Amino acid sequence: MDLFRTDGKVALVTGAGTGLGREFAVTLAKAGATVALAARRSDKLAETAEIIERAGGKSLSLSLDVTDSLSVTACLEQIESECGAPDILVNNAGIARQSFLTDITEKDWDAVLDTNLKGVFLVAQATAKAMIRTGTRGSIINIASILGLNVTKALASYIAAKSGVVQLTKAMALEWSRHAIRVNALAPGYFVTEMNKAQFEQAPAQELIKERVPMQRVGDLSEISGPLLLLASDAGNYMTGSVVVVDGGHLSVGL
């Protein structure tokens, strides 16, 4: 089991204030990493940092707007200054705007693509440069989605962005493997978070899950910890360019 440990490593997790990002950050801290928590909302980062501290882990909190290259550069410089270059990046920050294609505004389209695709590129690029400069054998994990592999209605901007993340991950893996940097993607299905908990407690959502997900339930956040550690740790040393789906079998029946 030591292969799955991250002792002595520095991990950057974007969007670490809530939901999957918080779960990723706490998981890596419990596995031994010093975790740089990055997001725009400092109050939520403080909550994540407190959870890590109570668990005996180490973290630092950083302000980050993934759509702003200057913010990304400043964040990486601070991490390097305080902890050294990241060994692990979890590119998790993301947003969604639900709207049909004939109704979505240009502003909302740009917001989703800028955060979910451009942001992934900017943070990964800056992190990879730091890894290459310091000779770090790193692992970059881009958080995609099953909606990057299939489609549904009223989420076209999110689907376009996450599809881009899937292909971008493979391009990064191809170019950066010569620097001993592994790049993989996690593609989650439905997981319960603070934002959607109330929705999944309603009868229509529960019926949808029973009908469309073979395991007939949504995922618990703890159930994505194992796949994350596989990609982040030495246990996944021969994995790059992979897209790991964690969805209770949802893609097996389509969306």
Image (tube, rainbow, N blue to C red):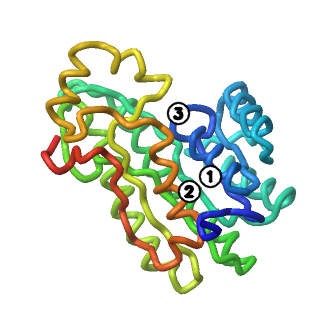
CA–CA distance between discs 3 and 1? 24 Å
Of mark 3 and mark 1, the one earlier in the sequence is 3
Q: Mark on residue 69?
A: 1
Mark in front: 3 vs 1? 3
Of mark 2 and mark 3, the one earlier in the sequence is 3
Mark in front: 2 vs 3? 3
In the picture, the quarter occupied by the N terminus is bottom right
Q: Please name the residue shown 35% across and 50% down the image.
A: 246
Q: Position of residue 107 (x, y in %)?
A: 39, 30
Q: Please name the residue shown 72% across and 30% down the image.
A: 42
Q: Position of residue 138 (x, y in %)?
A: 62, 71
**Dot 1: element:** helix
Q: Is residue 103 toward the left or the right of residue 228 in the image?
A: left
Quarter holding residue 15: top right
Q: Quick one: 14 or 238, which is closer to the camera?
A: 238
Quarter holding residue 247: top left
CA–CA distance between discs 2 and 3? 22 Å
Disc 2 vs disc 3: Cβ atoms closer than 8 Å? no
Q: Which residue is mark 2?
A: 122
Q: Which residue is mark 3?
A: 19
Label 3 Cα crowd, 10 Å radius (few <14 / some 14-19 / many 20+):
some
Disc 2 vs disc 1: Cβ atoms closer than 8 Å? yes
Q: Which residue, as the protein is rendered here, is positioned at the far right?
A: 82
Q: Amino acid at mark 3?
A: Gly
Q: Amino acid at mark 2?
A: Leu
Q: Quick one: 39 or 111, which is closer to the camera?
A: 39
Mark in front: 2 vs 1? 2
Q: Amino acid at mark 1?
A: Ser
**Dot 3: element:** helix
**Dot 2: element:** helix
Q: Position of residue 167 (x, y in %)?
A: 34, 64
